[in-house]
Amino acid sequence: MRATIAACFLLGELISLLSLAVAGRLEMVQWLWALALLPPLLLGSVTSRLLHRRLDASRLRQGVLLFALISGLVLMIPF
């Protein structure tokens, strides 16, 4: 499941960067944000590898799905 989620995030990020580039809106600020977020990304990856075997897979799956459900619902709220 971790690999699937990581692949979805990567695909989404690549589509976002491609969309910004096509629209002519890919600027230095996006590259700086990408660089700033690399350390947390690496830290999260290392931490997940260390904790992977110690967490109950069923509860982790439920938590991830609940988080995805709530995130999707929040995105549907008009602002």
Image (spheres, rainbow, N blue to C red):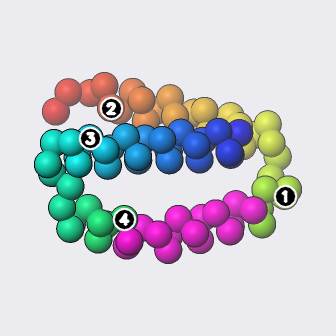
Residue 31 lies in quadrant: bottom left
Residue closer to the observer: 57 or 42: 42
Residue under circle 4?
34
Packing grade of label 1 (10 A; few <14, some 14-19, many >=20) is few
Front: mark 2 or 3: 3
* Of labels 4 and 2, the one closer to you: 4
As helix, strand or loop, the secondary structure at mark 2 comes to helix
Q: Residue at x 82, y 46 (%)?
A: 56
- What amino acid type should be assigned to the residue bearing mark 1? Arg
Separation of residues labelled 3 and 1 (CA atoms): 39 Å
Residue 62, position in %: x, y? 68, 34
The three-letter amino acid code for the residue at tag 3 is: Ser
Secondary structure beneath dot 3 equals helix
Q: Are marks 1 and 4 in contact (CB under 8 Å)?
A: no
> Would you say the residues marked 2 and 1 are in contact, meaning their CB atoms lie under 8 Å apart?
no
- Residue 64, percent from left and from top: 61, 39
Decide which of 11, 48 is in the foreground and name it.
11
Horizontally, is 59 left or right of 76 in the view? right
Q: Nearer the viewer, residue 52 or 25?
A: 25
Q: On the image, numbered disc 1 is attached to which residue?
A: 54
Q: Quadrant of the C terminus?
A: top left
- 47 sits to left or right of 69: right
Indicate the amino acid at tag 2: Leu
Label 4–label 2 contact, CB within 8 A: no
C-alpha distance separating marks 2 and 3: 20 Å
Residue at x 26%, y 41% (from the top left corner): 19
Which residue is disc 2 drawn over?
75
**Magenta residues, start to end:** 35-49
Q: Earlier in the sequence, mark 2 or mark 1?
A: 1
